[in-house]
Amino acid sequence: MSRIVMFARRVGAAALLGSALSGVALSGAAAAPAAAARAEAPAAARGFTAADLVTLNRISEPAISPDGKWLAYVLRETDMEANRGRYDLFLLNLEEKGAEPRRLAADPASDTSPQWSADGQHLFFLSTRSGTSQVWRYTFASGVAMPVTDSPVNISGFRLSPRNDRIVFWADTFPDCKADLKCTADRLAAKEKNPETGRTYDQLFIRHWDTWADGTRSQLFSVALADGKASGPVAHVSQGLIGDTPSKPSGGAEEIALAPDGKTVYFALREAGRIESLSTNLDIFAAPADGSAPPQNLTDANDATDTQPQVSPDGKFLAWLAMERPGFEADKLTLMIRDLTTGETRAVTKAWDRSIGQFKWTPDSTAIIAEAGHIGTNPLFRIDVRTGRTVQLTQGGTVGEFDLGADCIIYSWHTLAQPADFYSLGYGDIAPVRLTEVNKDKLAGVAMGDYEQFSFKGWNNEDVYGYVIKPANFDPAKTYPVAYLIHGGPQSSFSDNWHYRWNAQVYSGAGYAVVMVDFHGSTGYGQAFTDSISGDWGGKPFEDIQKGWAAALARYPFLDGDRACALGGSYGGYMMNWIAGNWPDGFRCIVNHAGIFDNRHMVYATEELWFTEWEHGNKPYYEDPEAYEKFNPVHFVKNWKTPTLVIHGEKDFRVPLEEGIKTFTALQRRNIPSRLVVFPDENHWILKPANGIQWHREVIDWLNRWTAPAGAGQAAR
């Protein structure tokens, strides 16, 4: 009997992992695995800084070897001189206690996407070491890495066939070039030489996220392998389909899967055409891996999102995640399973009021291991595919990427006070084992602020949750200025996780306490809670933010409510403008990153129209302008008086730059102390290391300026 089957028969025992924590608030200390307990920082330890944040090592893409002895993964290190991240493959011996990870095939280029050969003798990966992005193969016996492909276009990602006889890869190409990759390369080269630079469009999308449409699409191809090299003609797997697979801007390898016999590829594709900017429809397609026949749409009946196809290890079932409501990007993702023999399809987690983020089949095909948001945390769950019964496997914090071996789950885990490391959890175990400490040296002598989850009665007297993070080297005899962080999305969560843009420890390290509230509209508290923000942006969420602030001040005496600033990005930036006009005496200062100023301008300038229309009654502005104007910050500028820092990326097409400029113009016109920071090379997020440091310097300086005690003066620059 396998350990997984044994585990499945034991999950009812309360001693195993307990209930699913329904309604239970966890403090930072209670949430941490025993193996990850942090020692108390010495009083002399320095606070965490923005420079620390951008230079931390980051782990991703865990891949367990077929024999379960090794873990391959990707480590990102920051190259400050080049102002970018650098990615390398690392290998960890899972059988040697206390083994140190070793860098594999080190090269100045970036190596990602490790995938083991079936015999465990080779590691395939994606690399730029040849000057373009290609598939490579590392051979353990020789210690040599060799190129597998020599594509004329950059390969964006790939999947290795389970039988190692083929790779399926995706690349941005012109659809009419079909399988001729050189056709795309030649056309792009000719375009570079053409002195005419005007772009012409006949339909939306004209641009998406941070990129102008150039006619290319992410398309799926495959090529046979012989002796570790691409051999023979390239096949066009997604032939005849107009759209992107994986979907853009954020889809990846999780949207592509191969059957265990390697003969069939399952993939998610976002439909294209005139309605693309209005549609959240992704469908699951099946196609022969060798491109010998056109793809078949398996989910054509559903006009909402279908994504992340995965075939069970025994090849009998196809699982994927599906939404029900077309046009709503934050609908619940339900686990679907189809019998590939009979076609019978079941919504396995329809009755479970949680939205799955990522999942994998257990090796014996009896269960799904999935990550889902849950009351301010993001744990792993085991889902029985027959009954849909769920059991929580991890406590507190946030599970990132994970992989399943025959005897264990290896996953990355992080919290509000700890960046990600890898942990191992046996299928029948309770306590995880920590495998890595990739930032041990970088964080030596650094004090992190302790944190606690709290709850209060928000809108309609419903339970709302939040977190309070103490300043580093906290002294209970003192009071501290406060940074009140408001999350974006708006269907998102400031949960127990290590964030690389809105990181609470940067403020803690600068001497601030931090308050964060998961207002109505946040994820992880049931779909009705998430749905409640749509059409009510300035209503229920705003009431929760005000009541959460009052609750935090009443519960935590070290919070100095008279020296507090509110900060937010995207929807959080919208809320900064809403607070400025509807709660003008609430805070000493405001920081507005990529915030919406005028709903009318936003709906006609943003790229994903489905978002703005769904959020305002699922109608265009011209059909129901009142829905957009009801909570439009532009109407309350006359009430503004709070000093505000405005930050925006010039390549932000989600919330276009003009929203930030308008906010700054309104502030200046009213003679309100204000400052505008524009990053010409950033999008909706701030990603480059040097810009991340500048962003935080501007923000902390702004907070220091307006929260300093009387007579303290402005923060030094």
Image (cartoon, helix red, strand yellow):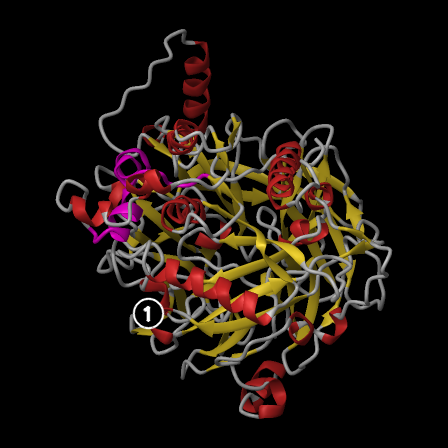
Against 413, is 297 above or below?
above
Against 154, is 227 above or below?
below
Q: Where is residue 204 in the image (x, y as percent from the top left)?
A: 26, 33
User: Along the horizontal axis of the image, is 144 left or right of 520?
Assistant: right
Visible in this render: residue 523?
Answer: no
Question: Which residue bears the numbered disc 1?
Answer: 528
Closer-to-camera residue (715/315):
715
Q: Position of residue 473 (x, y in %)?
A: 78, 59
Against 691, is 115 above or below?
below
Name the outermost residue toward the left: 623
Identified at 45% across, 39% down, the residue is 594
Please identify the quarter of the rendering in which residue 378 is found: bottom right
User: Along the horizontal axis of the image, is 391 left or right of 15?
Assistant: left
User: Along the horizontal axis of the image, is 574 left or right of 395?
Assistant: left
> Which quadrant of the figure contains the C terminus?
top right
Q: What element carries label 1?
A: helix
Please identify the quarter of the rendering in which residue 404 is found: bottom right
Closer-to-camera residue (499/288):
499
Residue 607 located within the stretch drawn in magenta: yes
Type of amino acid under label 1: Ala
Read off the magenta span.
594-618
Name the outermost residue toward the top: 195
Residue 124 located within the stretch drawn in magenta: no
Q: Position of residue 370 (x, y in %)?
A: 51, 69
Question: Dot 1 surroundings within 10 Å: few (below 14), some, or many (20 or more)?
Answer: some
Against 402, is 386 above or below?
below
Identified at 18% across, 44% down, the residue is 620
User: Along the horizontal axis of the image, is 480 left or right of 235?
Assistant: right
